[in-house]
Image (cartoon, helix red, strand yellow):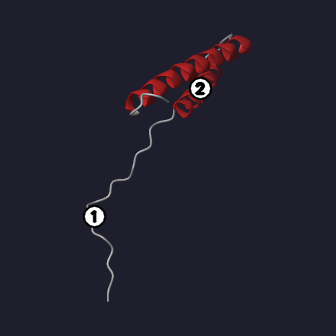
Amino acid sequence: MKQTAPKSGPSTPATAPVRVGTMVWGLLIVALAAIIIIGTLEPLSLNGTYVTIGLIIGAGVALVTGGLIAGKQRDNHSPTRKS
């Protein structure tokens, strides 16, 4: 007797949601690279400490905001409305 696999329609791969942390750290690295490139092309007098503090504060705000939004969306999709 020959066994065959059950037929199903075309399978679509499950898409994973974009992770907030990945996006924020990627944008942080791109911003830092842009500052370095601009600094080599144009003579800038930037204080490295202030630039670093600004980037870290921006990344922190983006991570907290993204986490709150992701938590709110997850809470809306759960049947008990609990995370």
Which residue is nearer to you in this view: 34 or 2? 2
Q: Position of residue 18 (x, y in %)?
A: 46, 36
The circle on residue 58 is none
Q: Residue at horizontal 53%, vertical 25%? A: 67
- Above or below, comparing residue 38 to residue 29 in the picture: above
How many callouts does the rendering have?
2
Q: Which residue is mark 1?
A: 8
Tag 2 or tag 1, which sits nearer the N-term? 1
Q: What's the distance in space between the residues labelled 1 and 2, CA to CA?
A: 43 Å
- For label 1, the SS is loop
Labelled disc at residue 28: 2
What residue occupies the far right of the structure in this picture?
49
Could you tell whether 12 is left or right of 40 in the image?
Answer: left
Image height of 71 relative to 49, above or below: below
Q: Residues within 10 Å of mark 2 (few under 14, many from 20)?
A: some
Residue 48 percent location from the top left of the image = 72, 15
Task: Please tell me in which quadrant of the rendered image residue 54 appears.
Answer: top right
What kind of residue is marked 2? Leu
Q: Position of residue 74 (x, y in %)?
A: 44, 31
In the image: residue 55, left or right of residue 65 = right
Q: Nearer the viewer, mark 1 or mark 2?
A: 1
Q: At 64% from the left edge and 24% from the top edge, which residue is drawn?
A: 36
Disc 1 residue type? Ser
